[in-house]
Image (cartoon, rainbow, N blue to C red):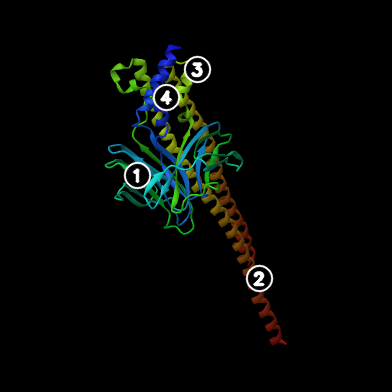
Amino acid sequence: MYGSFRVLLQVLSAQLLCVWVLGSELTFELPDNAKQCFYEDITIGTKCTLEFQVVTGGHYDVDCRLEDPEGTTLYKEMKKQYDSFTFTAAKNGTYKFCFSNEFSTFTHKTVYFDFQVGDDPPLFPNENRVTALTQMESACVSIHEALKSVIDYQTHFRLREAQGRSRAEDLNTRVAFWSIGEAIILLVVSISQVVLLRSFFSDRKTTTTRVGS
Amino acid sequence: MLTLALLSALCGLASSVFLRVADKERACFTENLPSRTRLVGVYWTRLYDEQGYRYLPVHPDLEVNVLATDPDEQVLLSGSGGPEGNFSFTSRRTGNHRICLRSNSTRRPLVAGGALALHLDLRVGDRTNNYAQIAIEDKLTELQLRVRRLTEQVYHIQNNQDYYRLRLKEVHWIQSSTSRWIFWCVVVQTLCLVPLVAWSPAW
């Protein structure tokens, strides 16, 4: 009972350390000729990472732009498939990042982004004081960090797989239409070629017969 | 204890990525989920005054409609909440799940020049767990809670691995279908051309 209460107190106190999990990953659809902007309130000195990847659509590229609260461009790339940008916030305020598909006339794109602000919260306040942890607790922390990176790699793998599957499906559809189309064209051309050639020889036979008689 | 609870409640309003939406405009997001995966979404809204360049609280009458559909377009979750709320569901099938949010301020229309700042945080798998609650409910010590967290992470990783196995089978099927199309196209072309070449002198 006392142990559980102590844990609750520690977890609640950890939640109060608000230099904390501000981070989101979202996947959204970006129609052609459209631009979508997202915002985040960040305090000065916080290390942030913006990662994005185009999952489906066209040439799998998108324009991305990141601005600080005063409108200064911190990051700007055109027609990028994926990228990662890390920066430390130099000002307090609302940062804005936008994804644009305005260069595309008819392809919708699906874009994934992961905007991490600050570090993940520790489970307990003790985790930051390494000397206070027992060996078991240290081992748990190390395993937790390793598993977090495994999950992160799995996310990236999932996005790559989605992209690869999208390309494979496109290819399959195009090959199917091309095969059917080419087979029909070949058949029509062959038959019409034979018919045309026969018609040439039939005309000549009639002419020859008339001249003879 | 009371002070801690109050401070904790205030910190629940931690920031998150937000987007500006017009009233009744739908904001949709996709989540590619393996089956049996829990998704928790937390949203809250503020009013953005475009003329004053500031954020104001919204009226409690504002409704936010949430709609979640599975890869087969079946509705998993459909409901309305206030300007702040949360929702959750567990995926039944592997694939792209769609989550849409739409604000509705019919009872109290937004002022002209105002847009809504919609904050949204979607968490999947082990990140949905509230370890404080788990510690209390299951009466766990510190070490037990850490091990529990590791177990949840491993379960999430296993789920993802099963998902990849399924997806790889699909990609394999698509690639073999592409090969079959190419093969049969070549066969049909050969069957057309060989008789043509062989019998055209006779014709």
Q: Label 2 near label 1: C-beta < 8 Å? A: no
Instruction: Calculate the distance from the C-alpha at mark 1 to the C-alpha at mark 2.
Output: 74 Å
Question: In which quadrant of the rendered view does residue B5 lie?
Answer: top left
Q: How many marks?
A: 4
Residue A143 seen anywhere in this rendered image of the structure:
no
- Considering the numbered disc 3 on the image, is that residue within a helix, a strand or a loop? helix
- Considering the numbered disc 2 on the image, is that residue within a helix, a strand or a loop? helix
> In the image, what residue type sits under mark 1?
Thr
Q: Pick whichever of labels 3 and 4 is earlier in the sequence.
A: 4
Instruction: Give the residue at mark 2.
Output: A195
Instruction: Give the residue at mark 4.
Output: B5
In the current view of this chain or complex, which residue is farthest to the right?
A: A213
* Residue A94 numbered tag: 1
* Percent position of residue B139, x then y: 48, 15
Question: In which quadrant of the rendered view does residue A44 lie?
Answer: top left
> In the image, what residue type sits under mark 4?
Ala
Structural crowding at the residue carrying mark 2, measured as other residues with C-alpha within 10 Å and reported as few (<14), some (14–19) or many (≥20): few
Residue at 46% in and 16% down: B140
Quadrant (top left/top right/bottom left/bottom right) for the N terminus of chain B: top left
